[in-house]
Image (spheres, rainbow, N blue to C red):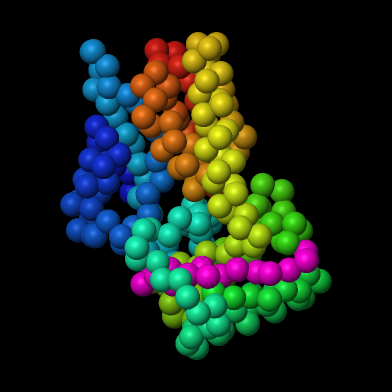
Amino acid sequence: MEFEFEGRTEKEAIDNAAKELGLEKDDFDVEILETQKSGLFKKGLVRIRVHTGNTHSSSSNNFSGADEAETGYRMGGSKAIFGEPVPQNEFEEKMAEFTSGIIERMGYPGKVSVVFREKHKIGLKIDSEHSSILIGKKGKNLDALQLLLNIYAGRLGREDMRVILDTENYRIRREESLVRLAYNVAEKVRESRDSVLLEPMNPFDRWLIHTTLNDINDVETKSEGDGLYKQVRVFYRGLK
């Protein structure tokens, strides 16, 4: 399920969401929709959308792509457990076999291993000579495969588990690229006193842009559009 909350800061908005929903902060994912900096005559505002685990119900055929795509390769600090790459239980074995089966039927076989484990999250990595094809343009093929894995996890009765799929460290490289993009665009906006509309991005990529620029006082961001792949507009304060 999805809910929207506001606060003067990102932390306050998340705290409001946790209190209102009666959940721990680790029990939901956050998509930042808009950030407004505080000023002399204006209070700061952060608007977020919260995605709870209920969106993974295996009894539904309408899975939310936003929940799957928004989860990048950030591990959530010390909670992630790195170690044995070989599947350690039946669920991990089935997920690895399912992933291997999909890419083999696609004609791009590879080896699947586990890269990290958390209470409600697991990371899988594909080692393949066809990695560039599996990633696809802007990671869309990888996102699609990840969505299929999360649907399959739900059908295995693990609606509580989030599966992150990567290959060739694409998700980390993508994060670094987006952070650089955010700062470059912010500089252009500050010089031109205008706004820039970025290409359509999945929720996690948009979250990176929002949070990267959140501390730049004279620049604000806002998501525009409908559907999974919205666009982020970066604008100079006072233009909106």
135 relative to 124, above or below: above
Give the residue at x 45% y 71%.
Answer: 82
Q: Residue furthest front?
A: 83
Q: Is residue 1 visible?
A: no
68 relative to 10, above or below: below
Quarter placement of the N terminus: bottom left
- Image coords of residue 153 (percent x, y): 50, 75
Q: How many marks?
A: 0
148 or 191: which is nearer to us? 191
Judge left or right: residue 158 versus residue 103: left
* Residue 70 within the segment the image draws in magenta: no
Instruction: Specify start and end residues of the magenta stretch as a single range.
Output: 115-130
- Image coords of residue 63 (percent x, y): 51, 62
Give the residue at x 23% y 53%.
Answer: 18
Quarter placement of the C terminus: top left
* Residue 126 within the segment the image draws in magenta: yes
- Image coords of residue 68 (percent x, y): 51, 59
The secondary structure that dominates the magenta segment is strand
134 or 197: which is nearer to us? 134
18 relative to 185, above or below: below
25 or 125: which is nearer to us? 125
